[in-house]
């Protein structure tokens, strides 16, 4: 609980009453490594704060080698199939714990209750949505403006722990290249 409190304290001052109400709605959830906890066509019913672990967002394919990884979330970040969550419609992608993962989750219904009951709820919701939008926008700009090698170097500089916990096939998909192309990029950089 302290991790999410520290994160939210950076955003705004939260009264004790608002904090108590908000935390009463949080549910701890744990997923073992490799668990797909939101499947294709399921409706996302949670926004979760990752206390530990790494989560991958991906579009599944019949041939698992052709899956498209388009995002990762880490400790002290929020994770959700946010478009599905907002619209309460089936998700077009999946969420998978790449490591043993612990998170605090709030349901769609409970979040609406927090919005309606607390003074801080809407601010937290808006700022969290803005953060998710900025991450998405940054990724799109990187895909459009940087070479595959530049995307790899930037990812490695921003998240050096990635190479320790995320298989290279997911990293290659994330930066938009084949595993073989990533291997060539890595050889050039060494």
Image (cartoon, rainbow, N blue to C red):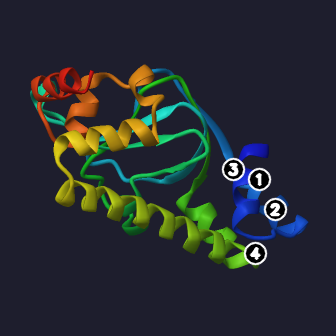
Badge 3 crowding class, 10 Å Cα cut-off, few under 14, some 14 to 19, many 20 or more, is some
The reply to whether dot 1 and dot 3 touch (C-beta < 8 Å) is no
| Left or right placement of residue 24 versus residue 135 in this view | right
Residue at disc 2, secondary structure: helix
Q: Rounded to the nearest whole Å, what is the CA distance between mark 4 and mark 1?
A: 16 Å
Q: Earlier in the sequence, mark 1 or mark 3?
A: 1
Q: Earlier in the sequence, mark 4 or mark 2?
A: 2
Q: Is residue 34 visible?
A: no
Instruction: Look at discs 1 and 3 and give the one toward the viewer.
Output: 1
Residue at disc 4, secondary structure: loop
Numbered label attached to residue 118? 4
Q: Earlier in the sequence, mark 3 or mark 2?
A: 2
Badge 2 crowding class, 10 Å Cα cut-off, few under 14, some 14 to 19, many 20 or more, is some
Q: Is residue 142 visible?
A: yes
Q: Rounded to the nearest whole Å, what is the CA distance between mark 4 and mark 3?
A: 15 Å
Q: Residue drawn at (39%, 63%), measured in percent from left and top?
A: 88
| Left or right placement of residue 139 versus residue 30 in this view | left
Instruction: Look at discs 1 and 2 and give the one toward the viewer.
Output: 1
Residue at disc 3, secondary structure: loop
Q: Position of residue 169 (x, y in %)?
A: 23, 25
Q: Which residue is mark 3?
A: 26
Q: Which residue is mark 2?
A: 19
């Amino acid at each position: 609980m302290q991790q999410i409190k520290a994160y939210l304290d950076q955003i705004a001052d939260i009264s004790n009453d608002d904090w108590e109400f908000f935390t009463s709605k949080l549910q701890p959830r744990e997923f073992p490594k490799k668990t797909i906890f939101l499947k294709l066509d399921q409706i996302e019913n949670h926004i979760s704060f990752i206390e530990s672990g790494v989560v991958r967002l991906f579009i599944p394919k019949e041939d698992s080698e052709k899956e498209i990884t388009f995002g990762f979330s880490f400790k002290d970040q929020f994770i959700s199939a946010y478009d599905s969550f907002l619209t309460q419609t089936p998700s077009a992608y999946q969420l998978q714990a790449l490591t043993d993962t612990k998170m605090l989750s709030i349901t769609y219904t409970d979040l609406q209750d927090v919005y309606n009951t607390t003074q801080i709820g809407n601010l937290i919701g808006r700022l969290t949505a803005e953060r998710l939008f900025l991450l998405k926008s940054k990724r799109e700009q990187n895909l459009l403006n940087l070479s595959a090698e530049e995307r790899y170097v930037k990812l490695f500089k921003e998240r050096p722990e990635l190479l320790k916990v995320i298989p290279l096939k997911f990293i290659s998909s994330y930066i938009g290249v084949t595993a073989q192309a990533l291997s060539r990029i890595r050889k050039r950089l060494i």
